[in-house]
Amino acid sequence: MSFQRRTSEKTTELTASVPVKLLTAGSAACFADFITFPLDTAKVRLQIQGEQPVRTVAMAPALNTSASLKLNPIPVPATQHVQYRGLVGTITTITRQEGFRTLYNGLSAGLQRQLCFCSIRLGLYDTVKTFYGSLLKENEAGLQIGTRILAGLTTGGAAVMIAQPTDVVKVRFQAATRSSTGRRYASTLEAYRTIHREEGVRGLWRGAMPNVGRNAIVNVAEIVCYDVVKDCLLLYAHMPNDIRCHFSAAVVAGLAATIVASPVDVVKTRYMNSPRGQYRGAIDCAIRMGAKEGMAAFYKGFVPSFARLVSWNVVMWISYEQLKLVIFNRSQS
């Protein structure tokens, strides 16, 4: 189960058995999630802002008829209340109104998610990439873009199907405010039980399809982009394989992930947090959100999403690379 050194024309890497890869990837992701979790909570609050219920008001009687003094209720959109403004403003508002600990609501589910999710999407990436490489037979001296993209899509989609319940619970905790009614859970275990009891198995996998799409895209943007940028820096910029290289590649990967994944991420968050029956599906959620709030709604929470994804990628990739080195060095001693 120890890392072994693999030398190629492109770079010198560390390889490991699959269990070690899973554990290393999951540990690095948990550390990154803990550091950046407040940014994720701010992102979720900004993404669901504007999702107001419909209320009814009384319609005044016509002036030219003696008919009726009866007031007819008509549905109108509830008045839009903007509670959160910007990344810093959102974090400040949450801390002032609900306390600092609220920024870490759902952390337990978030860490469970990373142990299930990132250990698969990152820990199995090299193995799946090797498999696709043997099928596509791309030039090993090249960047193998097709092989890497297929591997990223595969591991990203597979990880979601396993870890989806943890994502649903995490979003529910992060979206809940002190003033919100209903769907308040005392613990993650109670949340799993309550969602299963009230919404069935489908409730735990609510939003799975948009989440599969979102995380397959994010996986390609994050892992494949990091993989390619890192190789380019090593090959063409002659940068040493150290923290500077890992930091640079992680920043590019985080930016790419934010740009391509934000629209799907907003729809996923809205749909997973919605009461049962509010939307007919993720597509219906996207259509109604666009019609009501405009196309800009698909990039709500972009700044905290960018800050979170970039910082998460930096912490995760540097942690992951250093963990690999530590495990390798111990195995050699």
Image: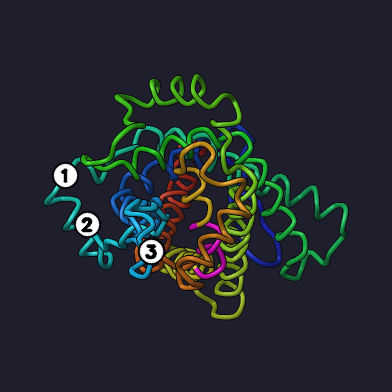
Q: Going by the image, does 322 lie left or right of 218?
A: left
- Colour convention of the picture: rainbow
Quick check: 134 above or below 242?
Answer: above
Stretch of the chain drawn in magenta: 259-266
Residue 301: assigned label = 3
Q: Which is nearer the N-term, disc 2 or disc 3?
A: 2
Q: Please name the amino acid that badge 1 sits on.
A: Glu
Q: Going by the image, does 5 lie left or right of 194?
A: right
Q: Which residue is mark 1?
A: 98
Label 3: which secondary element: loop
Dominant SS in magenta? helix
Residue 323: assigned label = none
Work out whether residue 126 or residue 308 is closer to the camera in this orientation and state it: 308
Residue 262 on the magenta segment: yes
Q: Position of residue 77 (x, y in %)?
A: 39, 59
Label 1: which secondary element: helix
Residue at left 38%, top 63%?
Answer: 301
Please say whether residue 217 is visible from this viewpoint. Answer: yes
Tags 2 and 3 touching, CB below 8 Å:
no
Q: Going by the image, does 8 lie left or right of 275?
A: right
Quick check: 196 above or below 84?
Answer: above
Work out whether residue 307 or residue 105 is closer to the camera in this orientation and state it: 105
Tags 1 and 2 touching, CB below 8 Å:
no
Residue 91: assigned label = 2
Q: Position of residue 225 (x, y in %)?
A: 59, 66
| Count of residue discs | 3
Q: Please name the amino acid that badge 2 sits on.
A: Ile
Work out whether residue 121 or residue 55 is closer to the camera in this orientation and state it: 55
Residue 149 on the magenta segment: no
